[in-house]
Amino acid sequence: MKAITHLALVTCSVALVSTAFAKAPEGWHTDVDAAIALAKKEGKSVMLEFTGSDWCPPCIMMKKEVFSKEEFLKAASKDFVLVHLDFPKADKELAEKNQPHADKYKIEGFPTVILLDGEGKEFDRFFASEYPEVKPFLAHLKEALEKKDLD
């Protein structure tokens, strides 16, 4: 009985640690300030994705159809440092950690994408689900960059 109780405690501890240190999907960052610094260093822009990965149907669809696709990651990463800011119901600690960013950028719905220049200045904002396929999404990113460069 003592061994079973110990195993249950270890299993619960591992589960808590794994959610407390939830990682971004491959190819994505989670630290906005570090991403801005990296973008500045590499001459890129920043793409912030605000998502509710376990409760928001459009967010789940975007991850499946766009954000997890190698074609998207390879193309978008040429011009952007990608930042994944998740607000899952199953991980309140992660949602609370990301809340100051949602407040700062006045997020009103999910999935929201905000594009920042290498100085951290916003130059575009849209609901990701407006572009539910890789090619139109990438086309919008390209258009936003071209418009930013004209300003």
Image (cartoon, rainbow, N blue to C red):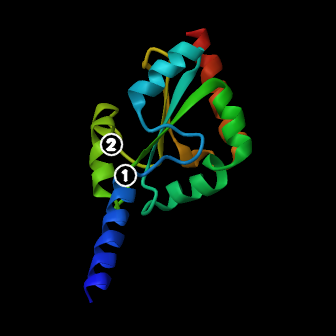
Q: Are marks 1 and 2 in contact (CB under 8 Å)?
A: yes
Q: Residue at x 61, y 18 (%)?
A: 147
Q: Alpha carbon of mark 1 to alpha carbon of mark 2: how far?
A: 7 Å
Q: Quadrant of residue 19?
A: bottom left
Dot 2: what SS?
helix
**Residue at numbered disc 1:** 87
Q: Residues within 10 Å of mark 1 (few under 14, many from 20)?
A: many
Where is residue 12 drawn, in percent x and y? 32, 70
Question: Can residue 139 be seen in the rendering of this structure?
Answer: no
| Quadrant where the N terminus is found in the figure | bottom left
- Name above or below for residue 14 compared with residue 59: below
Q: Residue at x 59, y 27 (%)?
A: 80
Question: Can residue 20 be seen in the rendering of this structure?
Answer: yes
**Residue at numbered disc 2:** 98
Q: Is residue 4 left or right of residue 67?
A: left
Q: Residue at x 51, y 21 (%)?
A: 38
Where is residue 95 drawn, in percent x and y? 32, 50
Dot 1: what SS?
loop
What residue type is disc 2 on? Asn
Pick the residue in front: 100 or 16: 16
- Name above or below for residue 20 compared with residue 123: below
Q: Is residue 38 left or right of residue 88?
A: right
- Name above or below for residue 45 compared with residue 97: above
What residue type is disc 1 on? Phe
